[in-house]
């Protein structure tokens, strides 16, 4: 979860429990809103990477569901404790990419920890999750926690404007001994969303601003994919 400060560093996808390095045709520069400085960059993934991520999630789903509710709750609790320990690190990532102050960033980390610890049981299956840059970490935790509790596996596509905290949480899940394939991350923009819609997911969930959500929903509808929106 260390990001170099001497120039933009590419943050890859996260598939099947490890960083997934692919040769992208283009990258998106992640800017610090306060300074305009390019601090990181992400590959603009497409259908091929989406298919890899969904395949990993699909392969992991059955065994994850069979682990039992108590075991899945333990995994969430361990991840929540780890996130709490790294709260300052995650808050720094949010401050750098979302343009929020330190207090707001720490509050969002706290919301994410609370979501992981207090999850209800949601719906199972394999689904894609698209996030905007407004509350990337908290929205991720609030949506993933009930899904994972129910035995679902996920492919998350964070906003290319604020990818680092979401990537870091996926990496942290591996350090917390989560099975590979439960959480997968796809970097990119609309091409990545389109790839998710054609990769045989059970549903696509969007967390964030309703205007962008309507655009994502239209893409899902065109592909015949069940769509759900959770406003920020």
Image (cartoon, rainbow, N blue to C red):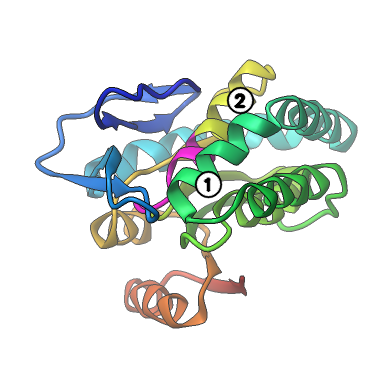
Question: Which residue is identified by label 1?
Answer: 95
What x and y, as percent, mark residue 9?
28, 28
Residue at 37 percent of width and 79 percent of height: 215
With respect to residue 9, does 188 lie above or below?
below
Residue 58 seen from this side: no
Question: As rendered, which of 190 and 109 lies closer to the eye?
Answer: 109
Quadrant housing the C terminus: bottom right
**Magenta part of the chain:** 160-167
What x and y, as percent, mark residue 41?
27, 39
Question: Which residue is identified by label 2?
Answer: 172
Q: Residues within 10 Å of mark 2 (few under 14, many from 20)?
A: some
Residue at 40 percent of width and 38 percent of height: 53
For marks 1 and 2, give the CA distance: 19 Å
What x and y, as percent, mark residue 24?
15, 37
Is residue 162 highlighted in magenta?
yes
**Camera-side mark, 1 or 2:** 1
């Amino acid at each position: 979860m260390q990001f170099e400060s001497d120039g933009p560093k590419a943050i890859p996808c996260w598939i099947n429990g490890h960083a997934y390095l692919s040769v992208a045709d283009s990258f998106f520069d992640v800017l610090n809103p306060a300074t305009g400085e390019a601090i990181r960059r992400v590959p603009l993934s497409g259908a091929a990477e989406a298919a890899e991520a969904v395949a990993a999630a699909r392969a992991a789903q059955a065994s994850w569901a069979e682990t039992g509710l108590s075991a899945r709750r333990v995994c969430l609790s361990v991840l929540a404790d780890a996130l709490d320990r790294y709260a300052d690190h995650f808050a720094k990532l949010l401050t750098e990419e979302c343009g929020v102050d330190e207090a707001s960033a720490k509050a969002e980390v706290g919301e994410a920890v609370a979501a992981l610890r207090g999850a209800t049981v949601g719906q199972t299956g394999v689904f894609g999750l698209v996030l905007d840059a407004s509350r990337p970490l908290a929205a991720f935790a609030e949506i993933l926690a009930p899904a994972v509790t129910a035995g679902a596996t996920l492919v998350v596509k964070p906003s290319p404007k604020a990818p680092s905290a979401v990537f870091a949480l996926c990496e942290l899940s591996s350090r917390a001994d989560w099975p590979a394939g439960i959480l997968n991350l796809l970097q990119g923009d609309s091409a990545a969303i389109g790839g998710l819609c054609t990769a045989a997911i059970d549903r696509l969930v969007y967390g964030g601003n309703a205007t962008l959500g309507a655009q994502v929903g239209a893409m899902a509808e065109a592909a015949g994919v069940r769509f759900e929106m959770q406003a920020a």
